Image: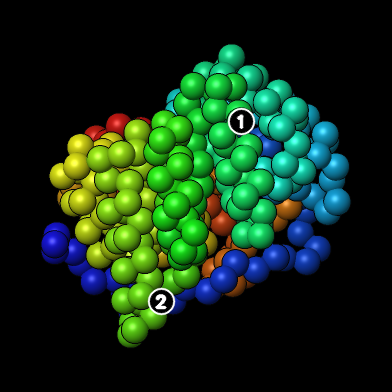
Amino acid sequence: MMPVLAASASARTRPPAEVPGRSPIPFDEVLLAAERLARWRIGATVTYRPLGDEPPRRVAQRLLASLAPLAGLRSNAQLLVHVAALGHDQALLAEVLQAARAASVAVTLDLTVAERADALMACAADLQASHGDLGLTLSCDRQRSLDDAASACALGLRLRLVQERHHETGTNRKAAADAFARMVDQVAGRARHVTLVCHDPQIVADSLTRLRAAGTPVALELLPELPHQGVLWVARTHHLPIRSCVSYGRPQAAAYLGPTAHTPRVLWWSTLSNSLGTLLPAAGHA
């Protein structure tokens, strides 16, 4: 087990909260955030959060329009696609994937509706030929993800492993750590690439040990609403590539940020500014 710095006890995690009355986040704000991330050798994972009841075709149009600007960024941007927002429509998904492949933008399919996991897996299996660098998001806290991970490895997909439940201490934290470890053991040596979306420093360090021992490439992805300092220390110490997820469309803010989070740039900067001294200055992008 790798030694890690203990996470700050004051870094309390709270579920993200929607902000009534806030204007939609424009795509240009994401581009500015991605450029700033690139200065710190951090790649951008860009996702669109649909506004209200936007139809799948409109969501697809927004994604298609984002590809050329994303391809031009220095931050090695990737696109995270909410399959449910496209209605699990394989024709629309194939259109987006083929355009992303032409633009050389990597795509990861996201799981936002647990009840539609079967539909997500079907889309991933049927559409893998539409993009040569396709990834799949799986929750480490769902039992069925172990089987889904085995299927994804067989398909040759990249994996984005997410810790959905965050616990600082006690039996719940141990259960979450054990669930993450089971997923990592399931994919170590089998997955083409693994991105860890986890803000527990010890879990990240242990996962990194297992994956690298098995020869599996691995990266870390940050979510802006959660504490960063502990996992950034792990990344800096062990030369782990870093990404950060940035979104546009429907606004979302973390409750613990308080009144400072008025704009996307302020939200992004306020969550990272206290951690910049621990960033990996020479890391490559994932």
Q: Nearer the viewer, residue 129 or 137?
A: 129
In this picture, residue 140 sits left or right of residue 27: left
Secondary structure of residue under mark 2 = loop
In this picture, residue 191 sits left or right of residue 163: left
* Residue at image location 65% in from the left, 19% down from the top: 99
Tell which tag, 2 or 1, sits nearer the viewer.
1
Q: Kindly give the residue lying farthest to the bottom in the view shown.
A: 170
Q: Nearer the viewer, residue 24 or 266?
A: 24
Q: From the image, which quarter does the N terminus lie in?
A: bottom left
Residue 252, image x, y percentages: 65, 59
Does residue 261 lie above or below 76 as drawn?
Answer: below
Find disc 1 in the rendering and name its residue: 126
Q: Earlier in the sequence, mark 2 or mark 1?
A: 1
Is residue 169 at all visible to an observer of this figure? yes
Q: From the image, which quarter does the C terminus lie in?
A: top left
Q: Residues within 10 Å of mark 2 (few under 14, many from 20)?
A: some
Q: Residues within 10 Å of mark 1 (few under 14, many from 20)?
A: few
Is residue 62 at all visible to an observer of this figure? no
Secondary structure of residue under mark 1 = helix
Q: Which mark is residue 161?
A: none
* Residue at image location 22% in from the left, 58% down from the top: 206
Q: Nearer the viewer, residue 117 or 232?
A: 117
In this picture, residue 135 sits left or right of residue 281: right
Q: Which mark is residue 167?
A: 2
| Display coloring | rainbow
Q: What is the number of callouts on the image?
A: 2
Q: Kindly give the residue lying farthest to the top in the view shown.
A: 102
Residue 276, image x, y percentages: 34, 51
Marks 2 and 1 sit apart, C-alpha to C-alpha, by 36 Å
Disc 2 residue type (three-letter): His
Does residue 246 lie above or below 229 as drawn?
Answer: above
